[in-house]
Image (tube, helix red, strand yellow):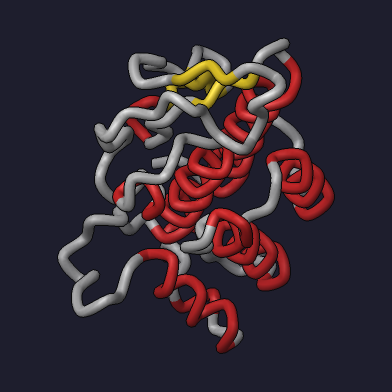
Amino acid sequence: MLDLVQRINIIKDVACALDYLHCRCGNVIVHCDLKPSNILLDADMVAHVGDFGLAKILTVVEGSNANAGSSSIIRGTIGYAPPEYGLGNEISTSGDIYSFGILLLEMLTRIKPVDPMFEGGLDLHSYAWRAWTDGVVLQIVDPMLLNEDANVNSFTSLVKIGVQCSYPSPEDRPGIGTVVQELFSTTTTPRS
């Protein structure tokens, strides 16, 4: 079982990997299938994003807007794929941001986005959004992460980032640079 410091380090590693793919490697690369099983941990517990089978390379000019040649095939895994892909929208970096937000919320709550508890319009995003807006974040956090040193503000900030990244509308989601900045300013845990 991963402790809080390990989970935060993993999520930071994934955010930095997305920052590289979206902003720092020449062309823009959209992963299209970010989920727990595609996050690999090395012997030092450093996270690496793997399985680029669905990835799409966008030219720098296309950037985060999307690719003109998008197919009608839904890319990604149910629960992690952004809702706009199901509507036939083009692939974009904001789709990876959505998946990242769901991944972050799952790591904090230990609840999968396809859990049977989510029915009648409830999903992991709205579940976390309600807890965040009602100020009861600790009620949804994985009990294994809670101890006498649990910092409500840190959990609230992390849930907020997850909620913002997983907004249903791609226009409402932050860019990866903002996400990385917020993650590193919110959490100061050293790599163990």
Coordinates of residue 76 in the picture (x, y in percent): 32, 35
Residue 154 vs residue 173, the one in the foreground: 173
Pick the residue in front: 46 or 99. Answer: 99
Location of residue 83 by image quarter = bottom left
Counting from the top left corner in percent of width and height, residue 154 is at: 70, 63
**Residue found at the far left of this picture:** 116
- Residue at position x 58%, y 31% in the image: 14
Give residue 17's position: percent from left, percent from top. 62, 24
The relative height of residue 34 versus residue 109 in the rendered view (above or below) is above
Q: Is residue 12 left or right of residue 52?
A: right
Q: Which residue is depicted at the point 30% across and 75% down?
A: 122
**Res. 149 image quadrant:** bottom right
Q: Residue furthest bottom?
A: 134
Q: Is residue 45 visible?
A: no
- Picture mark count: 0
What residue is at 77 percent from the left and 51 percent from the top? 182
Residue 181 coordinates in the image, percent (x, y): 81, 44
Seen in the image, is 17 located left or right of residue 179? Answer: left
The reply to whether residue 25 is in sight is yes
Q: Is residue 58 left or right of residue 31?
A: right
In the image, what residue occupies the spot 49% across and 21% down? 49
- Quarter of the figure that contains the N terminus: top left
Residue 164 in which image quadrant: bottom right
Location of the C terminus by quadrant is top right
Relative to 178, residue 9 above or below: above
Pick the front one: 122 or 42: 122
